[in-house]
Image: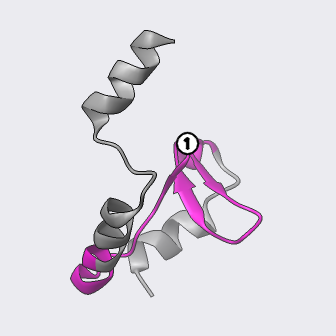
């Protein structure tokens, strides 16, 4: 229901939205990152779920891993 995300969805086919894409699952992405509505509660849930995952790493750990490869 976020108006800014709805506006982006309406211009996906033009050059102004070239870094945005709509996945096969219907999730709007910006440079391959998931777009989340301006809803504080939803942002808390997404953040909490992402951080509690066994697969999540801090950005420094990811950089270190990439440097080691």
- Measured from the top left, where is residue 13 in percent x and y? 70, 54
Query: Is residue 36 magenta-colored?
Result: yes
- Measured from the top left, where is residue 58 in percent x and y? 28, 41
The number of callouts visible is: 1
Q: Report whether 12 appears left or right of 53.
A: right
Query: Is residue 37 magenta-colored?
Result: yes
Report the residue at 30% width, 35% height from top: 59
Q: Residue furthest front?
A: 54
Identify the secondary structure beneath mark 1: loop
Report the residue at 45% width, 88% height from top: 1
Occupied quadrant, residue 15:
top right
- Measured from the top left, where is residue 23 in percent x and y? 70, 60
Q: Report whether 17 appears left or right of 66.
A: right
List the residue tagged with mark 1.
Answer: 19
Along the line of sight, which residue is nearer the eye, 63 or 42?
A: 63
Magenta range: 15-44
Q: Report whether 19 appears left or right of 1.
A: right
Q: Residue furthest top?
A: 68
Q: Up-down: is 51 above or below 16?
A: below
Q: Up-down: is 26 above or below 29?
A: below
Report the residue at 30% width, 67% height from top: 47
Mark 1, other Cα within 10 Å: few <14 / some 14–19 / many ≥20: few
Q: Up-down: is 47 above or below 54?
A: below
């Amino acid at each position: 229901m976020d108006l800014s995300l709805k506006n982006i969805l309406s211009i996906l086919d033009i050059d102004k939205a070239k870094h945005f894409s709509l996945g096969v699952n219907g999730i709007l992405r910006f440079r391959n990152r998931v777009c989340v509505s301006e809803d504080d509660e939803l942002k808390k849930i997404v953040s909490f779920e992402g951080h509690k995952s066994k697969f999540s790493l801090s950005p420094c750990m990811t950089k270190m891993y990439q440097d080691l490869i």
